[in-house]
Every structure is written in C-alpha cells, then in structure tokens.
Image (spheres, rainbow, N blue to C red):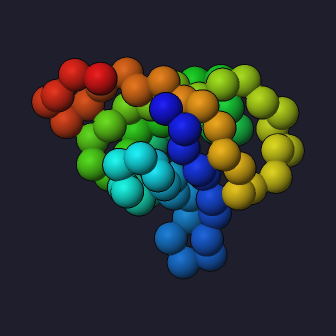
Amino acid sequence: MKIMIRRSPEAGLSIYVPKKDIEEQIVESEHETLWGGWIRLTNGWVLYLPELASDTPLPITINAKRLGGNGDEP
C-alpha cells in the first residue's frame, strides 16, 4: 500500500494512507533508522518498510506492506 511518512516537531513521525484517509503516529520500529523493518502505529497496524538509506529525506511516499495488527488481517 502507498503511504506517506513525515516528521513534525510536535508529533514526531507519522504516516498517512491516502486510500483509507488514515493518519497515525509511529509508536515503535524494528530499527532505529526506520527503514528495512517493521513499524507499529497508534491504531495497532504493523507495516513493513523497504530498505532505504538512513538519511532519506522526509516527507516521502513509499510502498509498504501491511503485516497485520488491531485484530484484523492485512
């Protein structure tokens, strides 16, 4: 699924999913650099992000794979 990741000073890292009109905060990540692992959102979703350079500028639109979360299947 296409998502946009951005950083804001007051809220930290968040994602926006245009097709579902969902904006959620990133609350946990597998890697400190964010890329190439899973992230957990405030709504319980778990997404897998592609490998990108650690200095990739934000905001960015990428393809992420939903692994599950919040009781419903991807």
Work out which quarter of the rendered image holds the C terminus and state it. top left
Of 33 and 51, the residue lying toward us:
51
Residue at 81%, 38% in the rendered image? 54
How many numbered dots are placed on residues in this image? 0
Q: Residue 13 in the image: x percent, y percent?
A: 56, 58
Work out whether 73 lies above or below 54: above
Q: Is residue 69 left or right of residue 22?
A: left
Q: Residue 6 in the image: x percent, y percent?
A: 63, 59
Residue at 74%, 55% in the rendered image? 58
Work out whether 72 lies above or below 28: above
Work out whether 14 lies above or below 11: above
Q: Is residue 68 visible?
A: yes
Q: Is residue 18 left or right of residue 67?
A: right
Q: In which quarter of the image is residue 55?
A: top right
Residue at the limit of the structure toward the front, as seen here:
19
Work out whether 14 lies above or below 49: below
Residue at 72%, 24% in the rendered image? 51
Q: Residue 26 in the image: x percent, y percent?
A: 46, 50
Q: In this view, does 2 lie to the left or right of 40?
A: right
Of 4 and 31, the residue lying toward us:
4
Residue at 60%, 51% in the rendered image? 5
Residue at the limit of the structure toward the bottom, as seen here:
10
Q: Can residue 30 be seen in this view?
A: no
Q: Residue 36 in the image: x percent, y percent?
A: 65, 24
Q: In which quarter of the image is residue 64?
A: top right
